[in-house]
Image: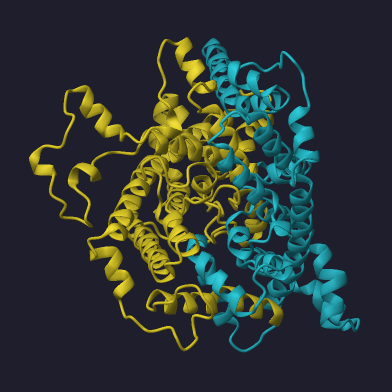
Chain colours: A yellow, B cyan
Amino acid sequence: MTPTLVILGLFMLIPIIMALWVSVSDWTGRGSPFAGGVHFVGADNYANILTGGGLPQRDFATSLRNNAYYVLLVVPIQTVVSLLLAVMVNQKILRARSAFRTAFYFPSVTSSVAITVVFLFLFTASGAVNRFLSALSISGPNWFADPRGVIHIILGAFGVDGPPAALQNAPFLGLSWWQWLAGPSVAMCVFIIMAIFTTSGTFMLLFIAALQNIEGEVEEAAMMDGASAWQRLRLVTVPMLRPTIFTVVTLGLVGTWQVFDQIFTATQGGPGKTTLTPAFLSYQASFLNQRWGNGAAIAFILFVIIVVMTLFQRIVLRERDTVPRRKRFVLSGAVTTPTAAVAAASSTRPPPSASPEPPEEQP
Amino acid sequence: MTRRWTTRAVLLHVVLVALALVYIYPFLLSVATSFKTDAEAVANPLSLWPETFTTAAYERLFVNSDFPLWFRNSVVVTVAVTLGRVLFSSLAGYALARIPFKGRGLVFGLIIGIMAVPGVVLLIPRFLVLNTFGIYDTWAGIIFPLMVDAAGVFIMKNFFESIPPAVEEAARIDGAGTFRMFWSIVLPMAAPAVITITILSFQGSWNELTHFIVASQRADLVTLTKGVAQLSSGALSQGSQFPLTLGAAMIMTIPVAILFFIFQKKIMNVSTGAVKG
């Protein structure tokens, strides 16, 4: 007990306090941050990022934009894909069920680095994906080297190539509206596809566990009432899965705001800074450019974003926290602690809510 | 079943087989490509069969690179971290579940709180601690911080609470001490939870990247994830070393894949065999 607490304290609690100090100091990475030469600079580091008007502010805004588009696309798609996979794999008429389950779950087992290497190969200019597309007579882009935003590309197709005057000013975080509305870059789209590919299997298992909890009488009752398969899914299954959907969305939100491994392995923020994420920017600022105060400040702002997102979602969905059944926690924990997954983020610490909740009592 | 079902069944199988292919094909392709020549990897990126079968990529990996060293380092870290996590998580979980001490609720709340902190926020803090204690760039700095994991404590605590106390009371009457009881009665009963923690720790530490980036820079302490990540971001400029990087990625995947296939019955049954509540 004691050693556990000591190590937890040493490596979790104290570090956070230390980092808070660094984020309000002018430490440059030399010597100890608590030595005499380091000064308290108040909120300077934060101000520099949020209102500085210089490159740090623009980089931070860019990374926020990139990550926001990533979250907006990954979270809904991975939730829907994993739910559909679960419903299909859970059909009673299916043969070789475990083989299918294994196939969908397998990408979640591998490390983010290995998957990224595979995707680097698949999405090169003359790689497998573009070959496949050209067989369908579509000429694929040079994925990882293409900084164009998807929304800009679509607008360009309609002849809008430059920003209209109204969108040229930069009222928010030093980035013009035109840039905010760029959409995810083509390069970022590869990471979006990768995230869906690697997490849908894990979330599928969560949904399967939940489906098996609710199936039976309800399904039968719906069948007796002559509901079609689609109606059963929409009107019976999905509403009953609400607690699980809530869990999956929460895990997704927390995970997708922390994209780091893939960026580090593949693009280092390029092309044209369109795959910069706050997590990678924080690392870059401190470990590579020795601007530790900035890096720590970015990390804490990111932390606040994640907390706010989670709270916001709790309020919006108004979901009572269901208490996981103790008896089944470990068993389900084995399945549902998304290690490889926590939505492709490298966090190896599965969140506490990662157990399929039993269905809520009917009011 | 009626005829409508059979059409549905066929359709379902077709759709699922197609999807399963999408999920598995990249891996098959990677294995195939790692046995191709560099030129062929670029020329025929879609073929699952190398025209000229060559192990050149693997020879380069094992003979002319630090790959074997990375592999060894990853094994050392993973074994140490897994052992540490099983030990610490079960001890702490048991204490929290069974031994009444002052501030137990507070400690547990703290653990839950720590679980909620996103890993990315901890990059800089971890480095600061390692630096302060002078274990940056050492084995200790690489292994210790990963050894304790709040989620593991949480899982173990929950499991121990589900074991009826009557068993322990009987042992206590027979005169077993707390540790003795823990070691020879409670822990064996918690086998499912221990296996769960083992799998999670193995997978977690084998696939870990950020901590290794932050904890060391010495070339002889590089693990697989870090080494391969640097290899691939370096190889981006040349772009034709795919057999090499894919070979490395595939070898990295083998241990976790084996673990997954061995325990998949355990893991998977768990998801299907849940008792209806």
Residue B120 spot, x, y in % from top left: 49, 60
Nearer to the camera, B211 or A92: B211
Instruction: Tell whether A298 sits left or right of A160.
Output: right
Compared to residue B49, the image places residue A288 above or below, namely below
In this rendering, the answer to whether B75 lies above or below B62 is below
Task: Give x and y (percent) for residue A312.
Answer: 32, 59
Outermost residue on the left side: it is: A165
Q: Position of residue B180 (x, y in %)?
A: 87, 78
Left or right: residue B170 versus residue B254 is right
Q: Quadrant of the N terminus of chain B?
A: top right
Quadrant in the rendering for residue B98: bottom right
Question: Residue A189: image x %, image y %?
Answer: 41, 35
Quadrant hosting residue A122: top right
Most foreground residue, B145 or B72: B72
Q: Nearer the viewer, residue A45 or B198?
A: A45
Residue at point 68% right, 61% down? B218
Residue that appears at 71% across and 68% down: B138
Name the residue at 63% across, 31% down. B241
Q: Please, is residue B221 above or below residue B13 in the view?
A: below
Using the image as rendered, state which of residue B241 and residue B12 is in the foreground.
B241
Q: Is residue A90 above or below residue A76?
A: above
Residue found farthest to the right = B174
Give the number of marks: 0
Q: Answer whether residue A236 is visible to the viewer in this image.
A: no
> Is residue B273 visible from the viewing direction of this image?
yes
Residue at the (50%, 37%) spot, across then down = A194
